[in-house]
Image (tube, rainbow, N blue to C red):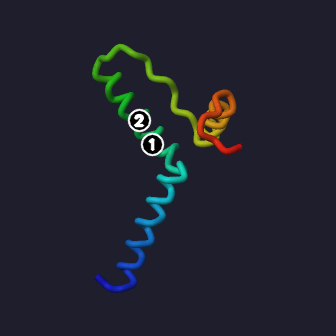
């Protein structure tokens, strides 16, 4: 592994960590959860899955929920 490749790998790790801390990966987690939920439903759980929200819809919903129930926010 070259030095440049090591620096890139380290930088990717830092970006991944910061996204997790700041909550920027919330939509990615939502999509993964939705996919696993759909797999469970296809296996016969009997629940109808809700449609996958777009990223814009997800963040709008997230913001609306935080405004209705402000917990642990500074503003």
Q: Residue at x 32, y 85 (%)?
A: 2
Q: Residue at x 66, y 37 (%)?
A: 63
Marks 2/1: CA–CA distance:
6 Å
Q: Kindly give the residue lying farthest to the right in the view shown.
A: 75
Please tell me whether residue 41 is drawn above or below residue 64 in the rendered image: above
Image spot of residue 6 (x, y percent): 35, 79
The answer to which image quadrant residue 34 occupies is top left
Left or right of 31? Residue 55 is: right
| On-image quarter of the N terminus | bottom left
Q: Residue at x 47, y 52 (%)?
A: 20
Q: Which residue is mark 1?
A: 29
Image spot of residue 60 (x, y percent): 66, 37
What is the secondary structure assignment of the residue under circle 2?
helix
Which numbered circle lies on residue 50? none
Please tell me whether residue 53 is drawn above or below residue 19 in the rendered image: above
Please tell me whether residue 7 is drawn above or below residue 16 in the rendered image: below
Image spot of residue 59 (x, y percent): 62, 40
Q: Which residue is mark 2?
A: 33
Q: What is the tally of numbered marks visible in this picture?
A: 2
Image spot of residue 62 (x, y percent): 61, 36
The answer to which image quadrant residue 38 occupies is top left
Along the line of sight, the residue nearer the viewer: 49 or 67: 67
| On-image quarter of the C terminus | top right
Query: Label 1 neighbourhood size at 10 Å, few (<14), some (14-19), many (20+)?
Result: few
Given contact means CB atoms under 8 Å apart, are the residues at marks 2 and 1 in contact?
Answer: yes
Q: Residue at x 39, y 35 (%)?
A: 35
Left or right of 13? Residue 69 is: right
């Amino acid at each position: 592994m070259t030095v440049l490749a090591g620096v890139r790998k380290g930088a990717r790790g830092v970006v991944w960590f910061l996204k997790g801390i700041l909550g920027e990966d919330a939509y990615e987690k939502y999509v993964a959860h939705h996919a696993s939920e759909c797999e469970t439903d296809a296996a016969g759980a009997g629940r109808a899955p809700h449609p996958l929200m777009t990223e814009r819809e997800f963040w709008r919903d997230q913001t609306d929920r935080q405004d209705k129930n402000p917990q642990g926010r500074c503003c």
